[in-house]
Amino acid sequence: MKEFTLLVAVLMMVALAGTGCKKKEPPPPPMPPQGAPGQPGQPGMPGMPGTPGAPHGGTGAPPVEKKIVVSDDVKGTWKAVKVEVEFKEKKSKKAFTVPLNSEFKVPDSDLMLKVGNFLPHFVMAADQITSGSNNTENPAAQIEVFQGGKEIFHGWLFAKYPAVHPLTHDKYGVALLEGVKK
């Protein structure tokens, strides 16, 4: 009788063990390549969910403005950026060279681009955005896009990571191609 009770107990344990939750967890989202914007260790990326200043999903804390620091070496090396404007309805793209810290009216459109700083090696710390070097490790440009006088984009565009914080618009796309040296 003891053997029968033991056998029943073992079978119940095996049966119960097999009925446990077998739901597979989804794989974690892919991480951006090393040095890419938005990776862990770079909190506060504009537009990232859960960060100060992020629309719908920020921490509840007031937005923290990060100081943009551009060294004299970087300022002395770069004079402009090349951007590509996509005309989605025409299924065409056109590249333009725009001087840093200037405005540019895109021909045959109602777009105006304001280009601010260019950082060849974009790095974000807790309190500042700067360039880690003068090498094009992670080129980024500070850009504002206006359509008919209304701002439709304000942020950083990344040449090597165009899908990070892109301009999303039905008619237009704007991408950073590269920095232009003096």
Image: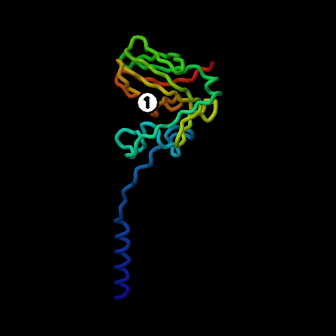
Q: Position of residue 103 (x, y in %)?
A: 47, 17
Q: Position of residue 107 (x, y in %)?
A: 43, 11
In the picture, residue 56 is in which quadrant? top left
> Residue drawn at (59%, 20%), measured in percent from left and top?
79
Q: 169 or 16: nearer the eye?
A: 169
Residue 35 falls left or right of residue 93: right
Residue under numbered circle 1: 166
> Residue drawn at (60%, 22%), measured in percent from left and top?
78
**Disc 1: CA contacts within 10 A as few (<14), some (14-19) or many (>=20):** some
Q: In the structure shown, which secondary structural element does the residue marked by tag 1 occupy?
A: loop
The N terminus - image quarter: bottom left
Q: Position of residue 18 (x, y in %)?
A: 37, 66
Residue 139 falls left or right of residue 49: right
The C terminus - image quarter: top right
Q: Is residue 106 above or below residue 117?
A: above
Residue type of the residue flagged with mark 1: Pro
Residue 42 falls left or right of residue 74: left
> Residue drawn at (48%, 20%), measured in percent from left and top?
84
Q: Is residue 114 above or below residue 23?
A: above
> Residue drawn at (34%, 84%), measured in percent from left and top?
5
